[in-house]
Image (spheres, rainbow, N blue to C red):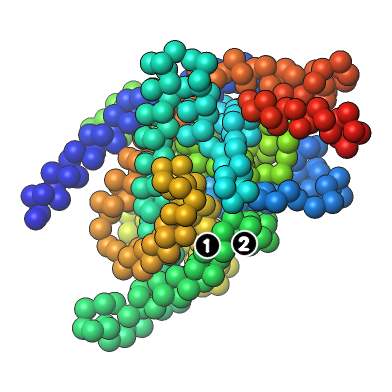
Amino acid sequence: MDQFVETITAVNDKINGFVWVTIGLWLLIATGIIMSAVTGFFQVTHIGHWMKKTIGGVFQKSSHNKKEKGSVSQFQALCTALAATIGTGNIAGVAAAIVIGGPGAVFWMWVAAFFGMMTNYSENILGIFFRRKNKDGEWSGGAMYYLQDGLGGKDKPKALQVIGRVLAILFSVCAFLAAFGIGNMGQINKITINVQSAFFSGVNLKPFFGVIPAIPFSIGVFIMIVGALIIIGGLKRIAAVAEKVVPFMAILYVLGALVIIIIHIGSVGPAFVSIFKFAFGAKAIAGGTVGAMFKLAITQGCKRGVFSNEAGLGSSVMVHSNSDVKEPVKQGLWGIFEVFADTFVVCSMTALVVLTSGYIDLETGNFLTDLAAANNVSDANLVAKAFGGTFGPAGEMFIAVAIFLFAFTTVLGWSHYGSKAVEYLINEKAVIFYRIIFVLFMIVGALATSSLAWDISDTFNGMMMIPNLIGVLSLSPLVYKLTRNYVDRKIKGKTNLEPMLSFDPEIQKEHAAKVAEGAE
């Protein structure tokens, strides 16, 4: 059995390295650069517009009296997407990137996010453009649909139709498997470990049936019950919870991080210097070279950035496509803001907390292992220890609660992604059975100890990314047309153009009829 596990681990490591390092990260950055160029670097040239139309419009009265059946509001779609993206990667993931790749990893995380804004934007507008209504009257969209109907549309050569369909199926299968791993068991496992450490440290209970750990099992049952009440209710219930929890948890975490940063204000300047100083490999390690450290900083920063904001994975587009918006670019603007909020705000706060914690030597870029060992600190609990150093035991408990909320809402978001993959692969009727199984697997996550399942899920995450990016790149001319049409009408004020709403001619006809009636 041990030999079998070792073989599976070795095979997965090879595939993971090929998917993420050899192809994935470079394809990801290249896609971000290309889509930024295609859209005229929209994230910079129209920063005032997308800020105004996203976070600037949250507190404005909506022009819609009620949401369309089977849809959620644009803000609910954003919060559900952020629920899935703002997770343990924003806390432990950022700390791990710095410990492994040095402070320079933060710079590359920013680079990945800067270009990832336009990758996420492109995914979202393609998701809206190619979405369709299912038999339950709910919108269904995502990479599988723009791969099938865009890359492999009926007007394309037969070979492209086959390629589009195969890539759509591959994406859906990997999304389904990743939902159980990274999107469920991995998050529940992190919750269980942190809650047990913060609130039940030193508490020993007799195992159930002599073999089942009592505390992890009890935590898992509690999470499963709460999760079932939300997840089985479907997207509307998930979105309603996300809309309330996500802003609260993000703001509270950022405020706590700001207090720590202000207290260590003298270290903030050197922290920024170290980020840029070590971004290009100034940090050398024993037995390694500057070039190797440069590569490590890039891969850790970019990879952790993708884990955090998911730009390029094609995951969040599955919920953005459920928005009640009609204009594809309008939802694309929320995609830009999603990456901005996740990485440039939340992850940056975590990075500054870590770099000013005293456990990173800002002169050498090294993790102070002796000091860390003396205080029982690792990359997994570094942020908690930093909060504890400022707020005492309450600080570590706060991080445990933050991780609980971050990870649990990630589970909620990924439950929807998996349901859309099942719907595409099978049908709408199969979704309820998927949700029940998904909820039951939370117990497995609470009790699991092996990291192999998470490593395999990480590989499936990367395998989602590749077909999605192929779809985005192949449809870049359409992204250009949609963006130019929107800019000409909404920003430059041209009135002689019709909006490009959907590839479906019926939706275009419906819009034209409403315009004629004065309804739009």
**Could you say where residue 301 lies in the image, as x and y percent from the top left?**
45, 35
**Could you say where residue 448 lies in the image, as x and y percent from the top left?**
29, 64
Name the residue rendered at 49%, 68% in the picture: 228
Q: Residue furthest right?
A: 518
**Could you say where residue 408 lies in the image, as x and y percent from the top left?**
51, 61
Name the residue rendered at 60%, 38% in the picture: 132
Q: What whole-number distance in Å separates the C-alpha atoms at marks 2 and 1?
A: 7 Å
Question: Is residue 257 placed above or below 488 in the rendered structure?
Answer: below
Marks 2,1: beta carbons within 8 A:
yes
Mark identifier at residue 392: none
Question: Is residue 268 placed above or below 212 in the rendered structure?
Answer: above
Residue designated by label 1: 231
Circle 2 residues within 10 Å: few <14, some 14–19, many ≥20: some
Mark identifier at residue 237: 2
**Could you say where residue 89 lies in the image, as x and y percent from the top left?**
47, 49
Helix, strand or loop for disc 2 = helix
